[in-house]
């Protein structure tokens, strides 16, 4: 097949599995034939938006009642939001003034807040940590960006899991060898993510809504679209080794051939793709703009029925940079997040799939209650946002912490989570189609927490 440059722009696939395969033991463990979960015939998509760096959620949601607001202002000092500027969402709390789109979605019951969620090994209280820190189990390197973010990616704060929770989920939802599994995990960010990595099939990456058959050239094998003579030799070797009696060799060859053939399978995927004109690229953006990523997700959703194997479940990873605000407030990030989420929900509603698509946020951790002079430092508990037509929105799930000096909900000035990461994510995965047994396999430490379903999904 020849490349037609005038008809189709090139795309560089991330093809994470082709560049770095899963560990050998993980690959061997995937050779068994597994029965797929019963997920029904309808389509569902999860869109994970990472607020990278640790979002200061206390400057996204603040108390509006006079007494609670006075305590909030006392602890937040120079970064406290003006009381009169808050956008009321219920009788006690308001969003920041530039979160108008998210306020509208909350009122429309398409957005929910999950209060004070974070990484936990088991339920603990601030009092327990203060009085007996040495014997109280807390996550490893609690306030470190990479460690805490990785625990969110693995869906396990104990450190026992070595692959992403979305990869484990995909393995359970699709049987081994299911063609649709190859297209169930999609990365549109400008970074690779552990959340999607380590399953039988690695995530496919898109940088724009176009496709290229130029895989061999991508791996440095020569002429575009054919890979030249060397590329043809490599492909022939891989194809010959698919039936090797050496299980690891055969699995490696099958994976590589599938990856090399993937662009050919997807040729024409984005022909006539739907265009959207209400996404903003923001200002002062670091990395790939959030609006551009969510617009790309919307475009991919508009052609979801063209994917080989017709996957009934897909999970997308989106990365929003710039939330590590040691020396500034996160005003820009908050407003841009609200605007971008509003545009994305409008897009999926316009396509008639608003009930089938759920968007949710995660972050490294929350921030300190007290400012450091210009911004805030690393914290622990944080609030999360869940958006979509299937969300039981217009509510705050869980107990909002007290934002005040010497808060009983904090360890020093860092909120101690009251909802575990596993309970938060398991609620989404249950909506996706996993049963209780599968939830325990996807989240091995879920059994340590009393709540498996927070109730925010319909």
Image (cartoon, rainbow, N blue to C red):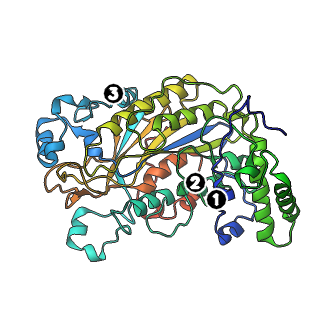
Q: Do the residues labelled 2 and 3 touch (CB within 8 Å)?
A: no
Q: In which quarter of the image is residue 10?
A: top right
> In percent of the image, x 79 and y 69: which residue is there?
249
Of residues 458 and 279, the one drawn nearer to the viewer in this rendering:
279
Of the two numbered discs 3 and 1 on the same chain, state the one appearing first in sequence: 3
* Residue 216 visible: yes
Residue 364 lies, in percent from the top left, at 39, 54
* Residue placed under numbered mark 2 in the picture: 196
* Residue placed under numbered mark 3 in the picture: 100
* Residue placed under numbered mark 1 in the picture: 199
Of residues 423 and 384, the one drawn nearer to the viewer in this rendering:
384
Question: Gap between marks 2 and 1, in whole Å?
Answer: 8 Å
* Residue 178 visible: no
Q: In this view, does 287 lie to the left or right of 227?
A: left
Name the element at disc 1.
loop
> In percent of the image, x 30 and y 30: which residue is there?
98
Q: In this view, does 264 lie to the left or right of 203?
A: right
Numbered badge on residue 432: none
Residue 352 lies, in percent from the top left, at 58, 25
Question: Gap between marks 2 and 3, in whole Å?
Answer: 32 Å
Q: Are marks 3 and 1 in contact (CB under 8 Å)?
A: no
Q: Quadrant of residue 361?
A: top left
Q: Are marks 2 and 1 in contact (CB under 8 Å)?
A: yes
User: Is 63 located above or below residue 130 in the figure?
Assistant: above
> In percent of the image, x 60 and y 31: which residue is there?
299
């Amino acid at each position: 097949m020849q490349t037609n440059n005038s008809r189709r722009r090139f795309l560089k696939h991330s093809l994470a599995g082709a560049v770095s395969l899963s560990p050998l033991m993980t690959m061997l463990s995937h050779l068994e034939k597994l029965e797929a979960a019963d997920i029904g015939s309808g389509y569902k998509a999860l869109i994970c938006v990472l607020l990278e760096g640790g979002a200061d959620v206390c400057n996204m949601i603040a108390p509006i009642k006079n007494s609670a607001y006075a305590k909030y202002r006392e602890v937040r000092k120079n970064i406290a939001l003006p009381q009169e500027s808050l956008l009321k969402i219920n009788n006690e709390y308001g969003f920041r003034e530039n979160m108008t789109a998210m306020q509208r979605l909350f009122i429309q019951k398409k957005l929910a807040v999950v209060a004070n969620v974070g990484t936990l090994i088991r339920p603990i209280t601030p009092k327990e940590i203060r009085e007996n820190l040495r014997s109280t189990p807390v996550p490893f390197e609690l306030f470190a960006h990479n460690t805490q973010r990785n625990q969110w990616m693995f869906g396990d704060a104990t450190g026992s899991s070595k692959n992403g929770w979305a990869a484990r989920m995909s393995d359970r939802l699709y049987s081994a060898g299911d063609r649709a599994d190859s297209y169930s995990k999609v990365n549109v960010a400008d970074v690779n993510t552990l959340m999607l990595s380590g399953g039988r099939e690695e995530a496919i990456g898109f940088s724009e809504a176009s496709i290229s058959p130029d895989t061999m050239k991508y791996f440095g094998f020569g002429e575009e679209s054919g890979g030249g003579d060397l590329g043809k030799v490599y492909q022939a070797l891989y194809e010959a080794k698919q039936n090797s009696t050496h299980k690891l060799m055969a699995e490696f060859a099958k994976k590589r051939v599938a990856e090399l053939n993937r662009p050919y399978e997807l040729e024409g995927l984005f022909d006539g793709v739907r265009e959207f004109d209400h996404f903003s690229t923001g200002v002062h953006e670091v990395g790939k703009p959030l609006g551009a990523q969510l617009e790309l997700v919307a475009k991919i959703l508009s052609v979801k029925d063209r994917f080989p194997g017709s996957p009934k479940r897909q999970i997308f990873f989106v990365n929003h940079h710039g939330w590590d605000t040691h020396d500034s407030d996160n005003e820009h990030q908050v407003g841009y997040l609200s605007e971008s989420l509003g545009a994305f929900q409008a897009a999926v509603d316009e396509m008639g799939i608003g009930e089938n698509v759920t968007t949710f946020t995660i972050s490294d951790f929350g921030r300190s209650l007290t400012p450091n002079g210009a911004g805030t430092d690393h914290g622990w508990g944080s609030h999360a946002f869940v958006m979509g037509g299937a969300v039981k929105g217009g509510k705050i799930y869980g107990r909002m912490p007290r934002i005040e000096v010497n808060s009983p909900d904090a360890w020093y000035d860092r909120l101690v989570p009251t909802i575990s990461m596993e309970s938060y994510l398991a609620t989404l995965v249950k909506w996706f189609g996993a049963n209780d047994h599968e939830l325990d396999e996807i989240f091995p430490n879920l059994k340590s927490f009393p709540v498996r379903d927070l109730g925010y999904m319909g």
